[in-house]
Amino acid sequence: MRAIPLLALLASVLPGPAAAQTVLPTVDAANTRYSDLDRITAANVGRLRVAWTYSTGILRGHEGAPLVVDGVMYVHTPFPNTVTALDLDHDGRILWRYEPKQDPAVMAFLCCDTVHRGLAYADGVLFLQQADTTLVSLDAKTGRVNWSVRNGDPARGETNTAAVLPVKGKVLVGLSGGEFGVQCHVTAYDAKTGGRLWRATATGTDEQMRVDPARTTSLGKPIGRDSSLKTWEGDQWKTGGGCAWGWFAYDAALDLVYYGTGNPSTWNPAQRPGDNRWAASIVARDPDTGIARWLYQMTPHDQWDYDGVNEMILTDAAVGGVPRPLLTHFDRNGFGYTLDRATGELLVAQKFDRSVNWATHVDLDRASPGYGRPVLDPRHAPESSGEDETTTGICPGAIGAKNQQPAAYSPRTRLFYVPTNHICMDYEPFRVSYTPGLPYVGATVSLHPAPDDPRTGTLTAWDGVAGAIRWTIPEPFSVWSGVLATAGDVVFYGTLEGYLKAVDARDGHELYRFKTPSGIVGNVTTYLHEGRQYVAVLSGVGGWAGIGLAAGLTDPNDGAGAVGGYAALARYTALGGQLTVFALPE
């Protein structure tokens, strides 16, 4: 396979130069979160100052990142998912605002706060999927609604908090609801009309999943007929979860879309024998037909709530001296995976957090019958203890060694910069019955620090080809902010206490910090306007890690254990909703 240079890859998926505009929360469709802007450098970033600010008016978790197109910044909020266009010529003067009218009852179905992870832009249009699953096309100049379509049924627990992906005149949309027993899907809509083009589930029949038993592969072999049905007991796949509530990537040269699927339902593994395919998996699909080219399941028969939805980062590098088109994925389960994104061949699977103990390793022997599968440690497998028994000291916790907060990649250093959760859990599964629209969880979880360190987060620099940690920066709390790498050799990220930090991309030493009004769970972005480079970030504590503070919860077991695991956070920050924009002095 001919290697495709990273810059050529970016040019093939972006509508213009990477520095000119930001059309996706992950910066580009390769999900690198890399900017080729270099006016802010490791030498001068320490001189950053606040240029202007904007209050969103909402006090919940502000995940995602603003978009910048043609001198206008587009800012989104948590529920009710308001969208505002800000004039960059006038320090964020409001041009228009779109305020969805959603039933507040939908908030009860949103897992892990009322967050939203952002908008997407293509061809003069903004795309927003609201919490109630309504997909909306907005005219970017006026905010006028072009069309809208409902993608799911909130009464059944179907919601969404994720960004969508515009690609080839289509809009790809995921779904949330794994904790309500939803059989989740990815759907393609016509970008101009909103007409539905295709839909593919993660569990079920070959037709529902849009797989070809003879041509769709896993680790180089055809998956065969009924690859999902054979790994579930009876009709459990109908309430099997596998939701795609994370990020999409697209490679124009291979014409493939990549995304991950979430946990199987319920969280009680004793109730769903088998591998539970294709939950907790990476999927590569043809965006025109929706047919899956290849699949890889990272956590067969998930016993820990290790959703596989985290971003797929597309880069190119030599592996064993051979140029390869690569996909790198940092999973909730604590392993960093590198695959050939053309074939789905597994090349690397190593722990990016040293506390990971649920599995000893992933079998990388291609001749082994267990090739590609994790080798479990039964001491940390809840199914070994049984229902109504607590398995203690499992690392990572259900929140994952990394959650949805996206990592960044710099082609200058060839390192990935990974925001992590250094946290463990105790896990008690119990029997649960399925009722549409009611929680279908089946486990009690408590989160706590790893035994080696009371600090629960790091920024980790990772070599994706070697599968090795190069350096780490410990943080008191999980790094729930999306990271940004730039051509100025600066890496930016935010902390749950509210600091925007800048570190040297080479060795991680700190160059700058600024305390924003609330905890940062948003993704740092940068843009160029009238020849001046700016850095922007949303602050507003929340998300799974900050749900206790955001929602006023006090029971330590609430928020799937996050309330107890992050109880100290209330001493460091408070609720907020603000955009802060930084620049060097003129």
Image: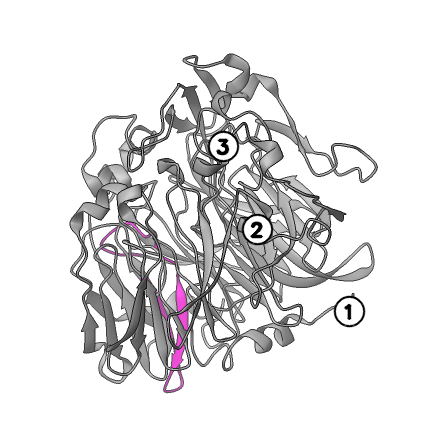
Mark 1 secondary-structure assignment: loop
Q: Quadrant of residue 239?
A: top left
Marks counted in the figure total: 3
The residue identified by callout 3 is 235
Magenta region includes residue 23:
no
Image location of residue 353, percent across then percent down: 56, 37
Q: Is residue 481 left or right of residue 557?
A: right
Measured in 3D between alpha carbons, the distance from the residue under mark 1 to the one under mark 2, in whole angstroms, is: 32 Å
- Asked whether disc 1 touches disc 2, contact meaning CB atoms under 8 Å apart, the reply is no
Q: Residues in magenta?
A: 515-537
Left or right: 561 in relation to 367: left
Q: Residue at x 33, y 33 (%)?
A: 562
Q: Residue at x 39, y 73 (%)?
A: 121
Q: Is residue 127 above or below residue 375?
A: below
Which of pointers 3 and 1 indicates the residue nearer the eye? 3
Q: Which residue is mark 1?
A: 2
Q: Please check the rendered image and state whether residue 527 is part of the magenta-colored stretch, yes or no.
A: yes
Q: Residue at x 60, y 50 (%)?
A: 462
Q: Which residue is mark 2?
A: 207
Locate the C terminus by quadrant: bottom left
Residue 143 appears at what percent x and percent y?
24, 77
Residue 382 visible? The answer is yes
In this rendered view, identify the residue nearer to me: 213 or 315.
213
Task: Determine the image quadrant of residue 13.
Answer: bottom right
In the rendered structure, the answer to whether residue 346 lies left or right of residue 177 reads right
Q: Which mark is residue 160?
A: none
Distance (Cα) linking label 3 and label 2 = 16 Å
The local crowd at label 2, few if under 14, some if 14 to 19, many if 20 or more residues have their Cα within 10 Å, is some
- Label 1 sits on what residue type? Arg
Name the foreground residue: 477 vs 157. 157
